[in-house]
Image: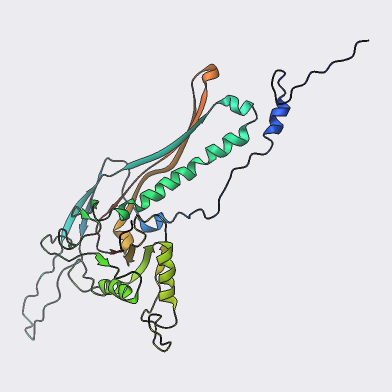
């Protein structure tokens, strides 16, 4: 009797053996690296309360009542003055769409390569949120040129070519929201930022001190600020008996996405009312099949539609650091 001959393939050449192919891909591992940055940008925009079903939104603002009560002496029949208020409006229409997609052939699934395809599709949200994180900081990184707000001014004004202004009072110039870092993190810089809040004038023209509640900076400056705020004594002096000149520690958030890592941005009480994130949809995902026969493709895309704007720029301050090369 003739011997039984068995023909087999090594890795699926002439006599295709799918089990051999499967074993070749038995373990699919994505190379990961430590230190993936946490997304923090959403912490620096207040949630918009505007509708999202129109091409633009018009907003009307008003101040509280202006002035003070009059001193009438002892004249019981004297007329008291009538209080008034200021108004101003703004149109918001700056939508932006960002998105990313991935396509693959259904036959790749049939070839037991799902361990490759599925993780790649699942990676789309990571690519999208990475782009969105850049967008969260785009306005801050370009705040001296990008314009918005009821006055159409930049976010950070120098007090020379553009001024901070009060509601309904275009002729009243209120200086600048840019300060210099004076050589980097120091008690002098912290004091400058605190002075801005201490001397804050309300929309009604009255003194209304504000506290610093949040600081945005690079990880290096964040470490320094935590040391300065948290020290038991004045660390700039060689005398442990001198008290720390700061009396409270605001929230300090670090990011690698500042265009100039030496910049420091201070946020004051109520900033969420001024700086807004306008959202139509976030991370909308869609999958569909296109093509025919062996040309079929599965296409998955994920998109976001949003915009950033501000009403007023008086409760955020840029401490400009030394320019980097």
Q: Looking at the figure, which quarter contains the C terminus? A: bottom left
Residue at the image point whose x is 40% and y is 73% from the top: 249
Residue at the image point whose x is 9% and y is 75% from the top: 80
Relative horizontal placement of residue 248, taking residue 12 as reference (left or right): left
Q: Position of residue 178 (x, y in %)?
A: 25, 64
Image label count: 0
Residue at the image point whose x is 70% and y is 23% from the top: 12
Outermost residue toward the front in this view: 325
Of residue 127 and residue 62, the one placed in the foreground of this image is 127
Question: Which quarter of the picture shows residue 225?
Answer: bottom left
Question: Which quarter of the picture shows residue 261?
Answer: bottom left
Q: Position of residue 230 (x, y in %)?
A: 44, 76
Relative horizontal placement of residue 17, taking residue 194 as reference (left or right): right
Residue at the image point whose x is 31% and y is 76% from the top: 188
Q: Position of residue 76 (x, y in %)?
A: 8, 82
Q: Looking at the figure, which quarter contains the N terminus? A: top right
Outermost residue toward the bottom in this view: 241
Residue 292 higher or lower than 219, as above or below: above
Residue 159 higher or lower than 226, as above or below: above
Of residue 258 and residue 300, the one placed in the foreground of this image is 258
Relative horizontal placement of residue 91, taking residue 128 as reference (left or right): left
Question: Which quarter of the picture shows residue 303?
Answer: top left
Could one spot residue 252 in this view of the protein? Answer: no
Residue 147 higher or lower than 79, as above or below: above
Could one spot residue 121 in this view of the protein? Answer: yes
Outermost residue toward the right in this view: 1
Q: Position of residue 136 (x, y in %)?
A: 37, 52
Colour scheme of the rendered structure? rainbow
Relative horizontal placement of residue 185, taking residue 117 as reference (left or right): left
């Amino acid at each position: 009797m003739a011997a039984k001959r068995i023909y087999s393939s090594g890795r699926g050449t002439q006599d295709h053996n799918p089990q051999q192919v499967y074993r070749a891909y038995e373990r699919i591992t994505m190379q990961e690296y430590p230190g993936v940055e946490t997304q923090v940008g959403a912490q620096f925009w207040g949630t918009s309360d505007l509708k999202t079903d129109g091409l633009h939104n018009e907003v009307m603002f008003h101040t509280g009542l202006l002035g003070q009560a009059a001193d009438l002496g002892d004249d019981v029949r004297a007329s008291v003055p009538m209080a008034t208020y200021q108004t101003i409006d703004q149109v918001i229409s700056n939508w932006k769409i960002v998105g990313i997609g991935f396509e693959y052939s259904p036959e790749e699934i049939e070839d037991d390569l799902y361990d490759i395809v599925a993780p790649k599709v699942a990676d789309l949200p990571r690519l999208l949120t990475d782009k969105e994180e850049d967008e969260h900081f785009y306005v801050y990184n370009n705040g001296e040129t990008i314009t918005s707000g009821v006055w159409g001014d930049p976010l950070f004004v120098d007090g020379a070519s553009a001024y901070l202004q009060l509601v309904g009072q275009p002729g009243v110039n209120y200086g600048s929201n840019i300060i210099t870092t004076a050589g980097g993190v120091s008690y002098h810089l912290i004091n400058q930022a605190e002075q801005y809040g201490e001397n804050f004038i309300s929309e009604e023209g009255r003194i209304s001190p504000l506290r610093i509640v949040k600081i945005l900076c690079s990880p290096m400056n964040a470490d320094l600020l935590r040391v300065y705020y948290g020290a038991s004594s004045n660390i700039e002096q060689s005398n442990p008996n001198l008290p720390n000149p700061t009396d409270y520690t605001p929230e300090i958030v670090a990011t690698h996405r500042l265009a100039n890592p030496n910049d420091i941005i201070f946020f004051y009480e109520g900033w969420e009312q001024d700086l807004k994130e306008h959202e139509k949809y976030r991370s909308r995902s869609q999958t569909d099949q296109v093509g025919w026969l062996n040309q079929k493709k599965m296409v998955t895309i994920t998109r976001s539609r949003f915009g950033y704007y501000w009403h007023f720029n008086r409760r955020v301050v840029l401490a400009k650091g030394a320019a980097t090369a």
